[in-house]
Image: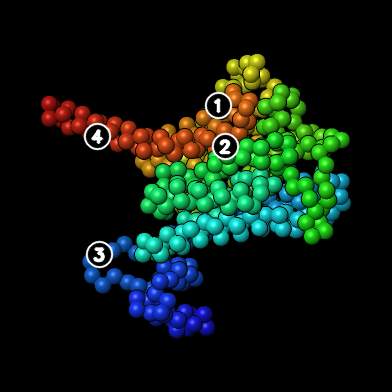
Amino acid sequence: MLRKYLNRIKPNFMPGGKLSAFQSVFEGLETFLYTPNETSTSGVHVHDALDSKRVMIIVVVALIPSLLMGMYNAGYQNFICSHTEGTFWQMFAYGFLAILPRIAVTYIVGLGIEFVVAQWRHEEIQEGFLVTGILVPMICPITTPIWMLAVATAFSVIFVKEVFGGTGFNIFNVALTTRAFLFFAYPASMSGDKAFIATEPIFGLGGHVTFADGISGATPLGQLATGSTTITDAVGDPVSSWDAFLGLIPGSFGETSTLCILIGAAILLLTGIASWRIMLSVFVGGLFMGWIANTFASDLYPASSLSPIDQLLYGGFAFAAVFMATDPVTAARTGAGKYVYGFLVGVVAILIRVYNNGYPEGAMLAVLLMNALAPLIDYCVVQININNRLSRQRNSQAS
């Protein structure tokens, strides 16, 4: 029925139809619902059922475990801080209602801009924002005002993506640029003890959170940055590595559960969507820099701080390694370059984290910095290969 309905209204959106101005919008919806059945009539072409829309959908599927865990944790943090009793489903419902408007706003603003630009350029609507639209709220604090998300999303889509030509041409990760815009434009709303815990009831669920009497919403990395020698949760109980692995700690909505992030990593690797070279080298770089920081302790970063393994569990490191650094558009593309790129992302993320108390989380800045350096890394790798081949050629001619 749906296919017949689309076929019936399609002529209205084709050139000459009364709704031809919205041809890009119709084609975007049609190709989202159905695989295009157009075939080439001449020449040789490579055919693959895994088009860009399907790639984006697989990434969204890989994000679902972190999304669901983030919903539960948002409710869990509110319930324990407000001293409210609640079941698993009540906590999950609270988080669902808290995050749903934010996801809706990022999609409405981002896709709206992409629809307008596609119509203006007379191009097809690209699929890149299918992933970006869900990433943006997942890497931001749960208390980020919706209007801020709308402004930051519009800024990133226009000035980081569309200005450069749209999907596939941006040099910086769009979701991380949105986060960076918010961090530097509205720092008071993006950091501090009160940014990562929802404080108000939603449709009768949860309770009012008052940051007093031992209640603190500081993230584990935020606590270490203020000189704390022990890590506690929002109500003052000690936090174990297992708690951090599961994701029952304050933090950005989708970044707290390393377990769910690793499930997403497995989906991306098994389907061949993400580069295992980048993913592996990011973790290796993080462990290496974490070991350096722990082995050569200083007054700025004492050995009693996080172990190298714990560095991977706290903050947004694991999320950045799996979903941000592996972005095929902004990452290095040569085989050897991917190892260098990923390793440097891991090293720089921990380097910023441990030696800069003013900014306890370094994953966002590390990925954006390496986005800028990725073309240079690829260039160096290609030039080294060219020089090696020329050297071998000269040696063979001389012999």
Q: CA distance from mark 2 to mark 1?
A: 20 Å
Give the mark nearer the N terminus: 1 vs 4: 1
Q: Residue at horizontal 66%, vertical 20%? A: 303
Residue 133 lies in quadrant: bottom right
Q: CA distance from mark 4 to mark 2?
A: 42 Å
Q: CA distance from mark 1 to mark 4?
A: 33 Å
Give the mark nearer the N terminus: 1 vs 3: 3
Name above or below for residue 109 compared with residue 37: above
* Label 2: which secondary element: helix
Give the mark nearer the N terminus: 4 vs 2: 2
Give the mark nearer the N terminus: 2 vs 1: 2
Residue receiving disc 3? 44
Camera-side mark, 1 or 4: 1
Name above or below for residue 122 compared with residue 154: below
Q: Amino acid at mark 2?
A: Phe
Give the mark nearer the N terminus: 2 vs 3: 3
Q: Amino acid at mark 1?
A: Leu
